[in-house]
Amino acid sequence: MAIRKIAILTSGGDAPGMNAAVRAVVRTALGRGIDIYGVYRGYNGLINGDLQPMHLRSVSDIIHRGGTVLYTARSPEFCTEAGLQKAVKTCQDAGIDGLVVLGGDGTFRGAQDLSRRGIPCVGLPCTIDNDIACCEQTIGYDTALNTCMEMVDKLRDTSQSHDRCSVVEVMGRHCGYLALNVGIAVGATSILVPEVPFDFERDIVERMNQTAATGKKHFIIVVAEGIGGVTKLTKRIEEETGVESRATILGHVQRGGNPTVSDRVLASRMGNYAVDLLCDGRSNRVVAINNDCLTDYDIEEALHMKKVFDTDLYRMAHEISI
Ligand code: F6P
């Protein structure tokens, strides 16, 4: 069946590069003579019939902007059968032949539910957490890494001036990838991630004492949000090491900002590929990139895959931050 009309939505936490992906999907579709509708506020937009036709110029001047022009939401109603049925009806009434969804695991679960009910869906991995197992790099991750690095570089200035320890919490939900790579990029003395159990004495106090003995007087400890408790941890570090310490939770600043080159290019490639998949009659797929090659996975398979944490990289990070 020829694809005549597709829709696109962004769902879950926003990620820098979503707009670049929306632009790529819209421009690819229109260039192939396919009508395209933008759905507002994620799956809620499908439930409420909140969708508008998009044109070439609807996506002008957005490739460089963070956030999402389609807005986003997490939709509890969509997790109910009644909500799902409303969404299916909206698609059927509007004559939607295919849907591109941008988001993370939760978004893909929704796409799977719709695919199973006859609405062909393709997902693009957009999350700063980089926690999609089938894909080496998600859209938004590189920008968030750079944002965190910039913020921690600023913290380092003040930490150094005061001979302090800065304990910084970065996002990532249950995943430590953002923390690990930020930690490497800022030369953190210690990086705590949920994937690797840590020992307070060995991994923080002893490491700080060892580096202090070689003349270092300021420290950066990067903590993934999946570990939590940074305020308590910071107090304990100060008590046990005697080094004045401050906690910083970077928070949602990590989700904003202009996407990097890497995220813009990745989003553009993936958006174009998503339309290819729909035109080829493929459904229930997640687009991924591995070894710089675009590929795609069945959503069910993708959701069951486990992301393997790079323990070698984790070990290396600590080996060189002495
Ligand atoms: O998944 C992206 C993310 O920013 C996580 O890193 C974080 O745990 C969560 O979303 C925060 O969600 P919210 O925007 O609902 O506070």
Image (cartoon, grey):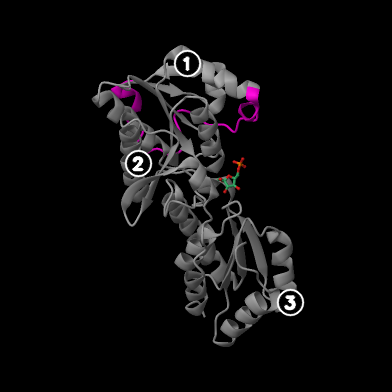
Which element carries disc 1, helix, strand or loop? helix
> Furthest-bottom residue in view?
213
Query: What mark, if any, has residue 240 been given in the picture?
Result: 3
Give how far apart the Cα atoms at labels 3 and 1 are.
63 Å
Residue 60 in sight from this viewpoint: no
User: Camera-side residue: 241 or 310?
Assistant: 310
Q: Residues within 10 Å of mark 1 (few under 14, many from 20)?
A: few
Which of disc 1 and disc 2 is earlier in sequence?
1
Q: Which residue is mark 2?
A: 270
Query: What mark, if any, has residue 179 been given in the picture?
Result: none
- Residue at 54 percent across and 49 percent down: it is 304
**Where does the image place residue 29, in percent across and percent down from the top left?**
30, 26
Which of disc 1 and disc 3 is earlier in sequence?
1
Whether ligand 1 has any atom under 8 Å from the Cβ at mark 1 is answered as: no
User: Camera-side residue: 132 or 1?
Assistant: 1
Quadrant in the rendering for residue 8: top left
Is 163 inside the magenta-drawn segment? no
Give how far apart the Cα atoms at labels 2 and 1 are.
26 Å
2 or 1: mark nearer the eye = 1
Which of disc 3 and disc 2 is earlier in sequence?
3
Residue 280 in sight from this viewpoint: yes
- Residue at 34 percent across and 35 percent down: it is 277
**Where does the image place residue 308, in percent across and percent down from the top left?**
51, 61
Q: Which residue is mark 1?
A: 92
State whether residue 263 is above or below residue 181: above
